[in-house]
Amino acid sequence: MQLIKLSATDSTNAYLKDLLFHNEIEDFTAVMAHTQLKGRGQMGTNWISDPGKNLTFSVLVKSLESPVSEQFLLNIYVSLAIYNTLTQLHVPDLKIKWPNDIMSGHSKICGILIENILSGQHIQASIVGIGLNANQLTFNNLPNVSSLKLLLGRTMDLDELLLNIVVNLKSLLAEKGKLDKEELFKRYETALFRKDKPSTFKNQNDEMFMGFIKGVSSAGKLKILMEDEIMKEFSLKEVQLLY
Ligand code: BTN
């Protein structure tokens, strides 16, 4: 595996994308940074991390070979690769919060930002960006955020974490042919945060409603059983889980 270590860059996602556009690079090439100056999060947010404390890296996936309509599959593979890595470390009460945050109890410990490079209706390559809170102990009063060191009481080796995540991702993708989609979705849904629990959501119009998370559709929408017993599907922009 090719690993590029940077002391500082704007965003490892942006760096890896630029590298891909200008060079012939191997599948699973990874870029990690001690410091990100403009770390990017989901939905145009910033990803802020104390320099050198956490794992901030991006890895190239060229071998997915799926149509755009199945792009959620990579969210599943990546979430499960991190979930499996953290399970091996005995992180308590692990869950995947749809679409792809990794939680321990009620605290977020990892965020994922996937950027796909398309060729027509086909995914040519994906830049998988992962921010895993490893050794940071304080989070400027951010609610519901934690780190592996806070949870496990020991300092984590960032290189080892990266390697384990990439190894787990490679092995899940290698299984791709054998693992049917139903089984893959089942594994993801089994680990889903607040599945089958009465939860409160907010829709696009800032209206609150109650429902039960039941799973995800093949297009990656969240399936919520509403109070009137009707199942509805929501995209990321259409719903926010409050509690
Ligand atoms: C989220 O909002 O939860 C997603 C956060 C993703 C952060 C990672 S850190 C490494 C990579 N480079 C970025 O600029 N973002 C991702």
Image (spheres, rainbow, N blue to C red):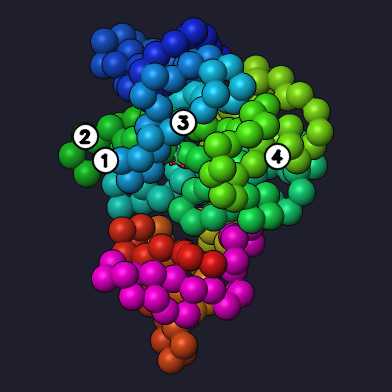
Q: Amino acid at mark 4?
A: Leu
The residue range painted magenta reads 190-210
The residue lying toward the viewer, choosing from 109 and 127, is: 109
Badge 1 marks a residue whose secondary structure is: strand
Residue 179 at least partly seen: no
User: Which x, y percent locates residue 2?
Assistant: 52, 11
Find disc 1 in the rendering and name its residue: 122
Point out the tag, 4 or 1, that comes first from the N-terminus: 4
> Quick check: marks 1 and 3 in contact, CB under 8 Å?
no
Q: CA distance from mark 1 to mark 3?
A: 32 Å
Mark 1 crowd level (few <14, some 14–19, many ≥20, 10 Å Cα): some
| Ligand 1 neighbours mark 2 (CB distance < 8 Å) | no
Find disc 4 in the rendering and name its residue: 86
Nearer to us: label 1 or label 3: 3
Work out whether 234 lies above or below 178.
below
Find disc 3 in the rendering and name its residue: 48
The label shown at residue 119 is: 2
* For residue 169, side relative to residue 114 (left or right): right
Residue at far front of view? 141
Badge 4 marks a residue whose secondary structure is: helix
The picture quadrant for ligand 1 comes to: top left
Point out the tag, 2 or 4, that comes first from the N-terminus: 4
Q: Residue 46 appears in which quarter of the rendering? A: top left
Q: CA distance from mark 2 to mark 1?
A: 5 Å
Please report the residue visible at 64 percent of the width from the left and 62 percent of the height from the top: 190
Q: CA distance from mark 4 to mark 1?
A: 31 Å
* For residue 41, side relative to residue 173 (left or right): left
Q: CA distance from mark 4 to mark 3?
A: 21 Å
Work out whether 12 lies above or below 110.
above
Q: Amino acid at mark 2?
A: Ser
